[in-house]
Amino acid sequence: MVDKGIGARVPRKEDLRFITGRGRYTDDINQPGQVYAVFVRSPHAHARIKRIDKGPALAMPGVLAVLDGQDVAADGLGNLICGWLVKSKDGSPMKMGKHPLLAQEKVRYVGDRVAVVVAETREQAKDAAEALVVEYEELPAVVDLAHAHDAPALVHDEIPNNLCYDWELGDKAAVDAAFAKAHHVTKMELVNNRLVPNAMEPRAAIGHYDPGQDAYTLYLTSQNPHVHRLVISAFIGIAPEHKLRVVAPDVGGGFGSKIFIYGEECVVLWASKKVGGRPVKWVAERSESFLTDAHGRDHVTTAELALDKDGNFLALRVNTKANLGGYMSTFSSCIPTYLYATLLAGQYKTPAIYCDVQAYYTNTAPVDAYRGAGRPEASFLLETLVDQAAIEMGMDPAEIRRKNFIPKTAFPYQTPVALVYDTGDYEACLDEALRLVDYAGFPARRAESERRGKLRGIGISCYIEACGIAPSAVVGSLGAGVGLWESAKVRFTHTGKVQVLTGTHTHGQGHETTFSQLVAEKLGVPYEDVEVIHGDTEKTPVGMGTYGSRSLAVGGEAIVKACDKIIAKGKKIAAHLLEASEADIEFKDGKFTVAGTDKSKTIGEVVFAAYVPHNYPPGLEPGMEEGAFFDPPNFTFPAGTYVCEVEVDPQTGEVDIVKFVAVDDFGNVVNPLIVEGQVHGGLVQGIGQALLEGVRYDEGGQLLTGSYMDYCMPRADDVPSFEVHTSRGTACTSNSLGVKGCGEAGAIGAPAAVINAIRNAIGVRVEMPATPERVWRAIQASPLAKAAE
Amino acid sequence: MYAFDYHRPTSLAEAAQLLAGNPEAKLLAGGQTYIPTLKQRLAKPSAVIDLGRIAELRGITEEAGGLTIGAMTRHAEVAGSPLVKRVIPALAALAEGIGDPQVRNRGTLGGSIANNDPAADYPAAVLGLGATVRTSKGRAIAADDFFTGMFETALEPDEIVTAVHFPKPEKAAYAKFPNPASRYAIVGVFLAKTAGGVRVAVTGAAPCVFRATALEQALAQSWSAASIDGVTIDASNLNSDIHAQADYRAHLIKVMAKRALAAAG
């Protein structure tokens, strides 16, 4: 049995440096001769650039370069891309508007990059940026998603109706037929509110061109440095891939927003060559993060559920309008399609599902993946709809769910929306959550709240997600431009220490700890002897990075495969040293043993023999370093039940979450402490979406929620002490570890639990964010609440 | 921020002199509004005169049965002062509820009222208690005359707040409904029963802190929740923004007034 192996609650080894201020983030890196970039951004949501006069800015002290869209075009640099092709119902490809590194001809949202100023100091660059003369011809802006189709303004002149694609999934005829014979139809219109990701560390980059090597280095805040290298070389064309090193050092949170290839990071790399190879640094200010980090969510949906007289789900019909913003971001096309509609079965055996999605351009910041990415939207829709159906059918919300669950005997289960769920036991999670929350005792708690003048409600959400994003063949057939395998290398040193090089990237997930536990378990080496290295294309094997709760299920399995190769090679060496047959060598707890004997060699001895091969199997390569790639056969399907209990103050509309129980099936768990922490973070973001967060633009496209004064991030006193349980896991069958993924679950499952609880308390559904004013207004319209008041 | 000259005088006279000779200069008190303003390049002063080293502007003393609080006294000092808790506990409670610990350890009474942010807490206390604002020009400005409009006060350009004198009320309390994002007041109501009658000051709800005279009259007749229930708050002069519409603010004024009443006893 290994100390600090799989299943141990090991505190994170990275935390010491983070909480003592010794992390090394991009802005902590300073290089000799470094200069500073400041971007000139559009103050208009939609305008034509009539003229840019660089003269006054170039004349300012310390200014080295002023570059704009014409310079980008003159150097033949490519446009930013969207890496996932989605086709419309008629088979036509999505209409991708050009997305240059710096705006050309038009600006399409407030904050759009117009030019960059590079100067000796940041203050000089800011002064010069203010001096740059840009003349605009303002154009009418389209901001409101619901009316984007018929808006007088076209974000991209060549794209009619601002419509990027009109996509569908599912059997429409079967769904229509089921609705025709339904006993009851529950219909709902809902908004999934737009969010700003708000990573603690703003985006930052240092681009450096080395004329001596004719090579480039880019330090940046990235969740996937190899993907950045690939896109910047293959599509933007700044440097060939083998001449470009991308380093993502410590990164302070991503939540999806640092997956994407944005213009700024590319521009500083390009600009470094323009200023003779001096390193160019750019660090976003928080207001730039609000304006330009890809936002999340932003759907307007109509959903209908058909039921028979007993409350069995017959069919689901969904129409969604999704906001893409002014340009397509790197993965924006797949979020409201393949990561959304494919999850609409939820935990239920609904036999027929149809969803169509219209994705529109608007004069707002680009929208892309944000923690959960499509799956929170699907789960919120389904779980509020099911709740509404229960109310309309006079059924208990827990029982209508139980009745429609895919039974645990039905796995693997093919849903009507493409996915095959491998394992799950939804009823077990529901039962456990109801037990932990004391569902039966709720009426007494509600009565007690009423005596204090408060309205108490309870809400259930049974979420599912598809994560561990992969497999390559499947995503490829759906339009993905890349494969979604993962890589690892496991390297022993002479002295038996282990370096693990991973293609994933950790920016808060705790990979350094989890992967060390994994290797300690597999190779029987002390946890402390394992070092995890990531985030540098010059050190690690080519990898696809971290998003979609994939690092352990895909990247961790690649590490296991590399460990398996180490063990296989070790057996050959041990057999030679022990003068036994390779077939008779067993490996356990760090020891190679001849079966049935006490003859053994430790892995340290075997590794030493591999590096000092004086007595060594003939023909076998020396050394002990193995790499592996892993492309899983399927997604993983974490699922669970969240139950939220709220108290509403009818006087003010304030919502207080008084109880929150999360029972998650993440399969096997490597480090329960980290998993619980991930769930806590996800729940807080989910509660933030439900109660506090929401982007607002005015009619002209100015961002009204552009700072923490107006955009409400959850604070510790906004959330309760969570009860998180992972004991009901069913092992995933797509990797040998049996693990699923836990990073996004909280954000996916929480919003519906909160909103359902509020509805249970006040009798009316409130749109997110359920601010005190919205709740108070809803109460004014609710007979149930009026009576209580 | 833009470049500016930085001065750190050690006496009020020195500060007043610097200010008088430098019309584009700005005073820096706790900096909780002004530093972010500078960082965002929303202000371009010729000089910043930091009042932080002027000892005579700090301190809390009992005077004429009430309290005199120096302009540079930090919120945390007021919140934690046994003297304030004894004489006007409502004022200590209000200071304890401003911003967060960082803000309370930097922000000052004088800075808050001179800035007169429409959603700040202190203006409600100054107006609600009928306090007097003392200045470097020897003026004693009644609260009713001090807050003249949104971010506007009766201070002259070269005048510095030195202290505020708060008379001791018979009863007082403050109740705030904070903006969930900024935690500034969406509505804050300071209620006081004073020698000069009932005073009700409302912050957060309108472009400037104001006295809710209808509530004052009703409470003067009967110091009871029923009196508040009977009042109709005119929403026509209240703010409507993305955080709260005017009718909701009008409703909250009554709710907060009742909570303040309950707290005041």
Image (tube, grey):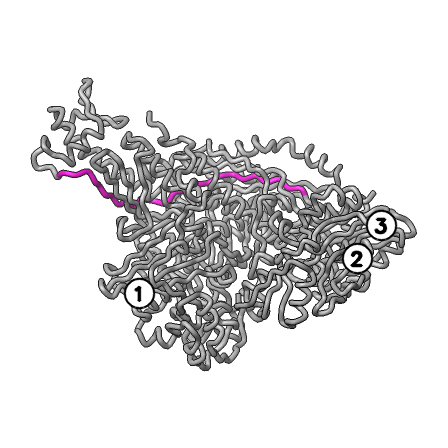
Residue pictured at 63% horizontal, 49% vertical: B105
Q: Nearer the viewer, mark 3 or mark 2?
A: 3
At label 3, the amino acid type is Ala
| Tag 3 secondary structure | loop
Q: Can residue B99 be seen in this snapshot?
A: yes
Residue at the spot of label 1: A235
Q: Is residue A627 magenta?
A: yes
Residue pictured at 47% horizontal, 78% vertical: A134
At label 1, the amino acid type is Phe
Cα distance, mark 3 to mark 2?
A: 19 Å
Near-viewer residue (B78 or A168) = B78
Q: Is residue B139 left or right of residue A109?
A: right
Image height of A57 relative to A672, above or below: below
Cα distance, mark 1 to mark 3?
A: 77 Å
| Tag 1 secondary structure | helix
Instruction: Chain letter for mark 1, please.
Output: A
Residue at the spot of label 2: B127
Where in the figure is residue A154, as x and y percent of width and height?
48, 74
Q: Is residue A658 magenta?
A: no
At label 2, the amino acid type is Leu
Q: Nearer the viewer, mark 1 or mark 3?
A: 3
Instruction: Chain letter for mark 2, please.
Output: B
Seen as rendered, the residue at the extreme left is A618
